[in-house]
Image (spheres, rainbow, N blue to C red):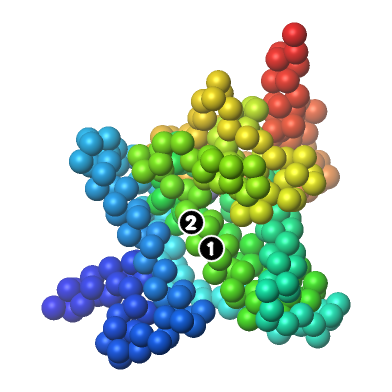
Amino acid sequence: MEILETLYREIVGFFSFSGLIEIIQTDNYKALLTQDGIGKALAPLIPVLLVIELIRAFFFQRLSFTQYKIAFFTYIFNRVISRFISIGMVGICIGLFEPYAIFKSEFTWYWFIYGYVVWEFAHFVYHYLGHKVRLFWCLHSTHHASESMNLSITYAHFFLEGPYADIIRTTICILMGVNPPLLFLIMFVDGTWGAFIHIGENLMKDARLGFLNKIILTPSHHRVHHARNPLYMDTNFCNLLNIWDKVFGTLQDEKHEEKIEYGITRPMKSGDFWDAYFGEIILLAKDVYHAPTLKDKVLYIFMPPGWHHSGEHKTASVVKKEYFATQKP
Ligand SMILES: [Zn+2]
Ligand SMILES: [Zn+2]
């Protein structure tokens, strides 16, 4: 019976049903009018959509387990590990940096807009470094390893990526005066949208969302971000607002003539969890080990993926430059 209970707890946990169940059991429907209550009510949305996506794919006989395998095992792996390390990075950063905030904001709609712009900037910083610093790419690459797009990718992260992202994002926001309740609301909106943009082509073929594609980051933009095509590599680092991609020139729309190829550029063992989770770390360790000088060893850790001590770089910028050179008339 204990197994059944554990299974029940895992299912309720995966679907994030517990908050909603609590509201129903206590008849406390007024809670649905509070931010906390709305959060509890919306929490099951992405897991439920994921299951609909799986059932649809199964029904139309398009379900191939390899598309979901990496994310599935990553989810299980993270569940097991996160039981043992529950790092309250957000709490630690708030406690450490709140006294140094440049000013104090309040819980109002205009501060929300300010906070969101700052949050997107902080997200851009974390995400950009995740692609441009080899050490951080080791943490982020798990999320890019899948060769298809579906909602399960939302859960596919190396277990240390969360704390790393939260240190950068929370620190920047708190120092820039975003107050903690506002930060939590922004994190909730960002988390929900950040999950939705991984919606699969099974559920939504064209994900440009009409005119919204011009003003925000749509699932179509995030599909482009997950692509390994030279044109699409290292673009669309934002999550909901596209301002910082516009400012830094990294915004890229999906082009009809350039079909998205999902995944990372190195050859991978297709659908292999261990390769997706630890592959980049092993490759970095090998490069550091074989680097001829101490300086090269350090550079391997901090230069972009593809950097080589011989000068024969295969970084995204080099690949893109070569690609654009061939495109010129
Ligand atoms: Zn990324
Ligand atoms: Zn993603």
The residue closer to the viewer here, 9 or 293, is 9
Helix or strand or loop: what does disc 2 sit on? helix
Q: Position of residue 326 (x, y in %)?
A: 71, 13
Q: Position of residue 69 (x, y in %)?
A: 35, 46
214 in relation to 94, above or below:
above
282 in relation to 26, above or below:
above
Outermost residue toward the right in this view: 102
Task: Give the residue drawn at x 35%, y 89%.
Answer: 28
In this orientation, does residue 213 appear?
yes
259 in relation to 118, above or below:
above
Disc number placed over residue 195 in the picture, else none: 2
The residue closer to the viewer here, 157 or 98, is 98
Task: Give the residue drawn at x 66%, y 36%.
Answer: 252
In the rendered structure, the answer to whether residue 4 lies left or right of residue 141 reads left
In the rendered structure, the answer to whether residue 222 lies left or right of residue 23 reads right
Query: How many numbered marks does the figure carry?
Result: 2
Q: Position of residue 65 (x, y in %)?
A: 29, 42
Outermost residue toward the front in this view: 211
Outermost residue toward the left in this view: 1
Task: Give the residue drawn at x 75%, y 8%.
Answer: 329
